[in-house]
Image (spheres, grey):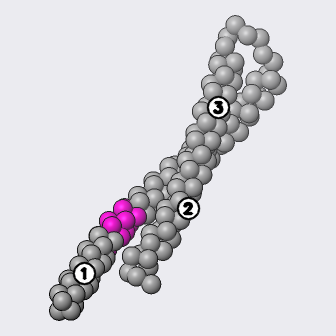
Amino acid sequence: MTRSQRLKRIVTLNEMQKSVASQKLAGTRGRHDGNVKKLEEFRRYRLEYARALQNPGQAMSAAAARDTRVFLGQLERTITALEQMVTRSERECAEDLAAWKREAQRANVLVDILDRCVRNEDVDREGRLQREIDDRRVELAGME
């Protein structure tokens, strides 16, 4: 097995690692986007219920106002938890992006090494062929 054939296997394995890293990054970004969307949605809910509670033109019973305040407290806790999830998923996205970039850079380096190896093998093969041709010419010239 030639050096370039061994390197091709390594390049193929690295491409698979890069693909796995890419898929992981896509999944992480999808979860992050979902977390951000949920956070925005819950912030809108909070705003709507806070407006309803503060709207003096709207008649609300004391029990309804109390229930709304309790619900707003639950929304606040949910929003806090979602903010933590968004922060965590941002960090995971950054880590997965860095991992993908490392794999992509490694893939580029390996492809460059493989290209150089193939070129060197081609030059060596052409040199051997040329030497064989030259040797045959010498043999043929000696037979004449």
Q: Which residue is mark 2?
A: 20
Whichever of labels 1 and 3 marks the residue nearer the N terminus, that label is 3
Considering depth in this image, is 102 or 51 the residue closer to the camera? Answer: 102
Q: Which residue is mark 1?
A: 133
Is 100 situated left or right of 88 in this image? left
Residue 70 occupies quadrant: top right
- The percent position of residue 107, horizontal first and vertical second, equals 40, 64
Residue at x 71% of width, y 39% of height: 74
Q: Amino acid at mark 2?
A: Val
Reply above or below: 75 against 118. Answer: above
Label 1 to label 2, Cα distance in Å? 48 Å
Reply above or below: 86 against 56. Answer: below
- For the record, the magenta segment spans 105-117
Does the magenta-highlighted stretch encompass residue 109? yes
Tag 3's secondary structure? helix
Q: Are marks 1 and 2 in contact (CB under 8 Å)?
A: no
Q: Amino acid at mark 3?
A: Glu
- The percent position of residue 51, horizontal first and vertical second, equals 64, 19
Tag 1's secondary structure? helix
Whichever of labels 2 and 3 marks the residue nearer the N terminus, that label is 2
Residue at x 58% of width, y 41% of height: 33
- The percent position of residue 14, horizontal first and vertical second, equals 47, 68
Q: Which residue is mark 3?
A: 41
Q: Amino acid at mark 1?
A: Ile
- Residue 124 visible in rendering: no
Considering depth in this image, is 144 or 45 the residue closer to the camera? Answer: 144
